[in-house]
């Protein structure tokens, strides 16, 4: 995760802010962005102190990644939502 502070003019949009950041290169494919955790279109006008977030696609399914981590450790996966079987 990288953070950058940008100063943009009044009436700037997400698109103009991202274009103004020299270090930002958009990932291939459709670009998903948001402000403070909510997905927004690129033409959304910015307000002072807005935090623009760029969302990239997941490379690994989170559930599969968890299974692989536990398999590597040799531990049993126990869900917090379902109690262990007591036997019987």
Image (cartoon, rainbow, N blue to C red):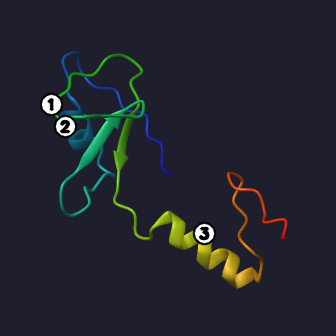
Q: Do callouts 2 and 1 mark residues in contact (Cβ within 8 Å)?
A: yes
- SS label for mark 2: helix
Estimate the spatial distance between the alpha carbons at disc 1 and disc 3, rounded to whole Å.
Answer: 37 Å
Q: Which residue, given by chain and number where applicable, does mark 2 sit on?
A: 15
Q: Quadrant of residue 16?
A: top left
Q: Which residue, given by chain and number where applicable, does mark 1 sit on?
A: 43
**Mark carried by residue 69:** none
Q: Nearer the viewer, mark 1 or mark 3?
A: 3
The disc, 2 or 3, on the residue closer to the chain's N-terminal end is 2
Q: Which percent across, then down, holds residue 17?
A: 25, 35
- SS label for mark 3: helix
Please tell me whether residue 86 is drawn above or below residue 36 in the rendered image: below
Q: Which percent across, then down, holds residue 42?
A: 18, 36
Question: Left or right: 14 with respect to 69?
Answer: left
Q: Nearer the viewer, residue 86 or 72?
A: 86
Which residue corresponds to the image point at 43% horizontal and 34% vertical from the top-left? Answer: 5
Q: Nearer the viewer, residue 53 or 78?
A: 78
Q: Nearer the viewer, mark 2 or mark 3?
A: 3
Which residue corresponds to the image point at 76% horizontal and 57% vertical from the top-left? Answer: 83
The disc, 2 or 1, on the residue closer to the chain's N-terminal end is 2
Estimate the spatial distance between the alpha carbons at disc 2 and disc 3, rounded to whole Å.
Answer: 35 Å
Which residue corresponds to the image point at 38% horizontal and 40% vertical from the top-left? Answer: 53
Q: Which residue, given by chain and number where applicable, does mark 3 sit on?
A: 66
Estimate the spatial distance between the alpha carbons at disc 2 and disc 1, rounded to whole Å.
Answer: 6 Å
């Amino acid at each position: 995760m990288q953070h950058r502070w940008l100063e943009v003019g009044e009436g700037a949009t997400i698109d103009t802010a991202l274009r103004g950041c020299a270090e930002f290169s958009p990932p291939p494919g459709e670009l998903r962005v948001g402000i403070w955790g909510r997905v927004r279109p690129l033409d959304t006008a910015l307000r002072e102190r807005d935090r623009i977030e760029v969302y990239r696609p997941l490379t690994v399914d989170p559930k599969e990644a968890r299974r692989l981590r536990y398999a590597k450790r040799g531990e049993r996966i126990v869900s917090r939502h379902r109690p262990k079987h007591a036997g019987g």
